[in-house]
Amino acid sequence: MRASFYTNMTFKEKVNNVLSEALEQRPSLFLIDLTITEAFKIIVTLDGDNGVVLQDCIDVSRAIEDNLDREEQDFSLEVASAGATSPLKLVRQFKKNIGRKLKVTTATEKIEANITEANDEFIVLEWSAREPKQVGKGKETVQKRAEIKYEDIKEAIVIITF
């Protein structure tokens, strides 16, 4: 098969290449994390523009299994989707979650708000807040909006509402 093509590469390079090929066949899926432990346990975490279903994990797992030689290097393999409560890491994840509510932590604040926009440099959050009136007593509801650069985001998690 194509195992001979990979003979002069490290194990991690082989896994990376095989995984890249598998994901090229499934353009709606993307890699969140790839870990290979010292005991050669391969842990692949995926996300998808339309979510990840079990069959996606099975297909990617098979693609890796079929293209690595256990005679050459024994390994174990785990392919999973990013959990619902996993922090967002990639711009693509922010874009796919436009319209949902996020909890975003920066160095100076925590904001729970709807993500209304995501481009390659920043996200836009919008929310309502109760603040003291400009004139007179009491509070009024005001609309807030914040542009937050990705490099300023320490953590962002989708808030699941039922």
Image: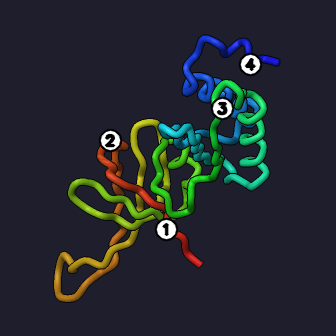
Mark 3 or 1, which is nearer the eye? 3
From mark 3 to mark 4, how far is it between C-alphas? 14 Å
- Per the rendering, the mark at residue 19 is 3
- Per the rendering, the mark at residue 3 is 4
Q: For the residue marked with disc 4, what is the amino acid?
A: Ala
Mark 3 or 2, which is nearer the eye? 3
From mark 3 to mark 1, how far is it between C-alphas? 30 Å
Q: Note whether 33 is above or below 11 in the view shown.
A: below
- Per the rendering, the mark at residue 151 is 2
Q: N-terminal of the two: label 3 or label 4?
A: 4
From mark 3 to mark 2, how far is it between C-alphas? 27 Å
Q: For the residue marked with disc 1, what is the amino acid?
A: Ile
Which of the two residues, 44 or 124, is positioned nearer the viewer here? 44
Which of the 4 quarters of the picture holds residue 44? Answer: top right
Name the residue rendered at 54%, 70% in the picture: 160
Which of the two residues, 162 or 41, is positioned nearer the viewer here? 41
Name the residue rendered at 22%, 79% in the picture: 133
SS type, badge 1: loop
